[in-house]
Amino acid sequence: MRLFALIAVASLAAGQHFDLGGPCVDSNGPAPFQQIAQAKAAGAWDRVIDLEKSSVRASCSNAYRWQQLAAALVEARRPAQAIQALEDMDGRGFDLNPATFDAVELKALFDTPTFRKSLLGLKLDRLKRLADARRARYRELLRKLPPDRRPPEHYIAKPACPFECCRFGNWTVDADTDLVAAPGSTQIIGRARKGTRAVALTGEVHLQPEPVVVLDDGDLAKDSIAFVLDYLGEGMAHVYTAGKIVETFSAFSDYCFHPSNSCRGETLLPAGELPKPVWWIKIRLPNGAAGWTDKPQNFGGKDGCG
């Protein structure tokens, strides 16, 4: 089986594509998600794979559908074919960073000896080593970056409502919450009571800017160090670059094997090194008193999309 996998992957590297059972229409047609779920429930894996292939054929430029096909092949215990599908994805320019995959089956496949010894696994390992060396160089450049070329270490974005469909206005209080005089203060000036309503007036996000190296061409200078600030939703964020703040699509990861608009560059600090951003909201109580809290999870009504 391993010999078959290596031969198949080698043939793909020579320009052949994974057998999708037909040509790519790429019409962005609907995916048969319900039929796939039913076939999985029945254990009809041949039908699952056929349906996943038809889903990809209808939208060959859709990375998510390719991932679902490869994940289904893993679930069906066809790892050699899953590697072939991933090799085709790589040839089409999709980024194969496991951190960007939703399917746990694919993340598990990447950790298997079969994948690591495949041509694709060896290629990704080489790319990781190159990226790690690049990250080390840029971390040294980051260390030498003068203060006037970087944002404040403790950055405050305001006003800030930091996710898609985020809204201020009438909120419900889902848990008792103390309000303080100002962000970071310990002076309690009131309490929002569970079961009542309150008005969210404004907010601000306190964060430490995240340094990244830009690897694609676009509105951020390629091979420059930029700093991701507050997220705005729908993949957008404020980014500090060349002494100014721009609103741009933010897609940075630990590895970018195919730099593009979907993976614009790589993070420079280890995962977990930066503290999580803190969203402070100013709340007005029914009695007119207003104070701040960093516990947005205690309130409902902030998501305008429902």
Image: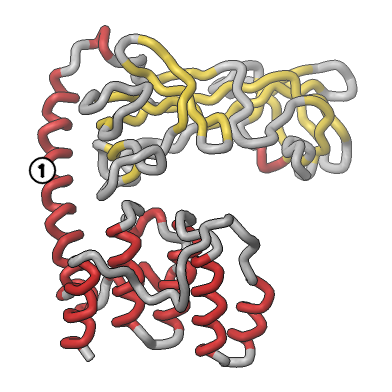
Q: Quadrant of residue 216?
A: top left
Task: Residue at 34% x, 23% y: name it.
Answer: 220
Q: Left or right: where does residue 86 sit relative to residue 143? A: right
Q: Quadrant of residue 6?
A: bottom left
Q: Nearest the camera: 123 or 254?
A: 123
Which residue position holds label 1? 133
Quadrant including the N terminus: bottom left
Residue located farthest toward the top when viewing the structure as drawn? 148
- How many numbered circles does the render carry? 1
Pointer 1: residues within 10 angstroms few (<14), some, or many (20+)?
few
**Colouring of the image:** secondary structure
Say which quadrant the C terminus sits in. Answer: top right
Residue 3 can be seen, yes or no: yes
Q: What residue is shown at x 80% (from left), y 25% (from top)?
A: 169
Q: Is residue 268 left or right of residue 126?
A: right
Q: Say if residue 212 shows up in the picture.
A: no
**Residue at x-position 36% and y-position 55%:** 99
Up the image or down, 260 lies above or below 104; here it is: above
Q: Amino acid at mark 1?
A: Ala
* Label 1: which secondary element: helix
Q: Residue at x 74, y 19 (%)?
A: 201
Comparing 144 with 280, the one in front is: 144
User: From the viewer's perspective, is 265 left or right of 143?
Assistant: right
- Would you place residue 31 above or below residue 163 in this image? below
Residue 153: x and y in percent read 34, 20
Closest to the observer: 63 or 282? Answer: 63
Q: Give percent across and percent down for residue 18.
A: 35, 72
Q: Position of residue 249 (x, y in %)?
A: 46, 31
**Position of residue 277 measured from the top left corner of the image (x, y, whole percent):** 48, 33
**The quarter of the displayed image where residue 180 is located:** top right
